[in-house]
């Protein structure tokens, strides 16, 4: 079963390698822009964000994270993201917005990690690995895959409008395939949500203890 899934994903990536490359470039540009934006913060903005981050670390030491509440919040947010990408995929004008969405996602990731590293130096690398990597290593590739899926379906809609002999049945089949791929990668995103709710808080607490000088 796992071999079949791995083969299906590999085939999907190979057939859409150019689109994947462009989507990955959009994400990477967003990450770079977010990291460079940190250097452009004013001293007041930097101080406010630093105080907020330090307060967050101190709060972790005295207050337990409600994983169930975090799961609920993260689940709702990711469902919204999946829905946005799905809607953009079924609209003809959605292609540029999918690239823009992916760049914004990368910007947020780059800014958060860049700011943490800027504030606490090398320890920020450790905190970023503990706080962001467990979830992002699962969710980010899936979002990129959903973006590619949306672009492919948008192109099929455009092609169907331009070539009259293409049947509605063909587009209908493509639509069901589009929905299936969306559901498939959404399942992996939900795994990332579970990691964020129940695994990441443990890692963050460990990293925070090291950063704050606790054992």
Image: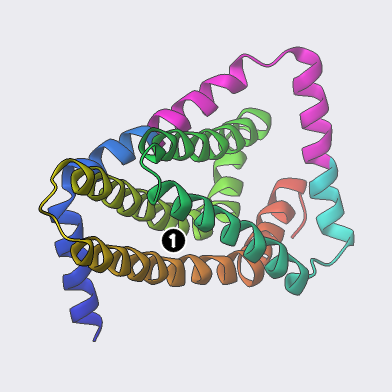
Q: Is residue 47 magenta?
A: yes
Q: Residue shown at 75%/22% (left/top)?
A: 46
**Residue 47 location (% of width, % of height):** 80, 23
- Please provide the residue range marked out in magenta: 27-54
Secondary structure under the numbered disc 1 in the rendered image: helix
At x 32%, y 40%, the residue is 24
Q: Residue at x 23, y 62 (%)?
A: 168
Look at the picture and state if 67 lies above or below 78: below
Q: Which quarter of the rendering shows the N terminus?
A: bottom left
Would you say 213 lies left or right of 100 here?
right
Judge left or right: residue 139 versus residue 196: left
* Figure disc tally: 1
Front residue of 130/146: it is 146
Measured as percent of width and height from the top left, residue 36 is found at 52, 20
Image coordinates for residue 28, horizontal then vertical, percent: 38, 34
Q: Which residue was labeled with disc 1?
A: 138
Residue furthest to the front in view is: 164
Q: Quadrant of the C terminus?
A: bottom right
Q: Describe residue 154's horizontal placement relative to residue 116 as left or right.
A: left
Q: Nearer the viewer, residue 4 or 148?
A: 148
Position of residue 157 measured from the top left corner of the image (x, y, whole percent): 27, 48
């Amino acid at each position: 079963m796992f071999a079949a899934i791995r083969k299906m994903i590999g085939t999907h990536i190979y057939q859409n390698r150019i689109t994947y490359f462009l989507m990955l470039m959009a994400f990477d540009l967003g990450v770079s822009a977010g990291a460079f934006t940190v250097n452009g913060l004013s001293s007041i903005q930097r101080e406010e964000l630093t105080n907020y981050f330090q307060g967050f670390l101190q709060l972790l030491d005295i207050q337990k994270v409600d994983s169930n509440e975090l799961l609920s919040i993260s689940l709702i947010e990711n469902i919204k993201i999946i829905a946005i990408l799905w809607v953009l995929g079924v609209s003809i004008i959605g292609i540029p917005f999918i690239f823009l969405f992916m760049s914004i996602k990368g910007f947020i990731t780059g800014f958060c990690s860049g700011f943490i590293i800027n504030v606490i130096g090398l320890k920020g690398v450790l905190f970023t690995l503990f706080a962001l990597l467990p979830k992002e290593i699962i969710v980010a590739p899936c979002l990129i895959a959903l973006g590619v899926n949306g672009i492919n379906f948008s192109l099929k809609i455009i092609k169907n409008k331009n070539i009259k002999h293409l049947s509605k049945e063909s587009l209908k089949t493509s639509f069901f395939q589009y929905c299936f791929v969306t559901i498939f990668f959404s399942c992996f995103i939900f795994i990332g949500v579970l990691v964020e709710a129940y695994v990441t808080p443990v890692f963050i607490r460990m990293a925070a203890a090291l950063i704050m000088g606790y054992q």
